[in-house]
Image: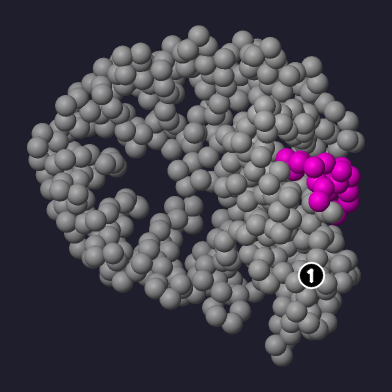
Amino acid sequence: MGDGRRYEKEKTQLNIKKVGVFILAVLVIIMIIVSLQKILSKTNNNLSSTGSNVEYFSVYTNGKWGVIDSNGNTVIDPTYNEMIIVPDSQKPVFLCVYNVDLNDETYETKVLNQNNQEILTGYDKVELLDNYDENYNIWQEKNILKVEKNGKYGIVNYDGKVLLSLEYDDIQTLKGASNNITIVKDGKMGLCNGLGEIIIDPQYKKILPLGDNAQNGYIVVDSNNKYGIVGTNKKVTIEPKYTDIKEESGANQYIVKDGNWELINNQNEVLLNSNGAFDDIIAVNGNNVIVKQNNKYGVVDINGKIEIPCQYDYLGYTFENYYIAEKSNKYGLIDLGNNTKIKFNYVSMYYRNDADIIEAGNSNNTTDVYDNGLNKKVTGVVSEVNVDDGYIKIWNGTDYQYYNFKFEPKQNNEVLSGKTLYLSKKDGKYGYINKSGDVVVDYIYDDATEQNAYGFAAVKKDGLWGSINKMGVVVAQPQYNLDINPIVDFIGKWYLGKDLNLNYYTDEK
């Protein structure tokens, strides 16, 4: 897997950039830095109440944009100069931008359904509500759109129901916190959820999330630039009186600044004061606090007792009493007693709390994977960690190997659910078997991929790629040179474009 690359149709690429001049935060950033996991995500389509599992994707051909479904059928004919944005792949709601004027910096939008009919009419403009976290993972708030009429903004759902009346001067997402929408009225900021229910009345200068996805409440800043906290119960927990509050604060424990950095509880009692003993309080985890002194990281307990001296270039909590640490540009794992548990041999280290594993990167681009007992289990290139189906997919240098979360080797037909075909290799050639192990597609291909969520698999022969369907029947003869494509994936005859950021399919050679 590599970096996304631009497609060659420079004129159309420029069209997307032009739109970005005007709607950078709303329309194009979501296409520029969208996470790869959203590209191939799958969910149910319940908008039309048909029970269908069909999904929708932007398609590009002959310099024009349209929409296809996950069966490869054309939904909106490719006739649009600007990219049609599909904000939610499981719902037939498509946002089109048109009449872009670079000189006046204006544009128009409209929303279409799967029948190419305009919906959500009666507004001056309809836009997406996009969001992103600190790692630039991008998503769109589900089933809601921002609408404008006569210079005022509100929120509607995909069925057109008004969730928030058009009386606000601006509406944006609370960055990094899903289902949290900032609202501005008369120069003051407030907050509502995705149902349009007011959480915080417009009365503050700024609102920030407290903890991941605002799970611990909200940091509010008043007109005097003083920081306080509003809890998830909508009540003021800490009156605005501090010069700063960190978003990394924990539940009922807050890192605040009032001269020095302090750790306080929700009764405003000071639990820990830096008071010259250290320069900064970085994060809190129960009774243990990561601190910083002279640009080095360490850990103290809630009473200020040193647990780990400030001697590391980085510290990050993982689980139990373990911390990822960096020194001399190498990463390892230490415990609260400052004992090395995984040696400092790695160029990177990451704890996946969803799978309860540690991925430690080697200088040769392979990864050592450790279980929660800190045992090194496998080495290779981690291709996928699928929590739902309970497997890890590793490239071992010659082929893919699957493991369950006990790190027991598994065959692909044991762990891949809902498939009709399974990739198989014999004598250096690829074919496909069924769940019983019977050969369905003979071993004639030089390379191939597993069947995707929509029943298609990509196959390569004589240097060119094509596709087969869930029965193993060829849908697109091998005809596309996709050597520079970071991901090879097909829906019918359409393949995933080079620029993963735009999440589109094409049939161009």
Q: Residues within 10 Å of mark 1 (few under 14, many from 20)?
A: some
- The answer to whether residue 90 is magenta is no
Left or right side of 167 for 407? left
- The residue located at (30%, 18%) in the rendering is 226
Left or right side of 407 for 100? right
Image quarter of residue 108: top right
Nearest to the observer: residue 202 or residue 440: 202
Q: Where is residue 280 in the image (x, y as percent from the top left)?
A: 20, 40
Q: Position of residue 7 (x, y in %)?
A: 69, 58
Q: Is 38 rendered above or below residue 104? A: below
Q: Does residue 438 appear anywhere in the picture? A: no
- The answer to whether residue 70 is magenta is yes
**Residue that extends furthest to the left in the rendered view of this protein:** 276
Nearest to the observer: residue 448 or residue 172: 172
Disc 1 marks which residue? 480
- Quadrant for the C terminus in the image: bottom right
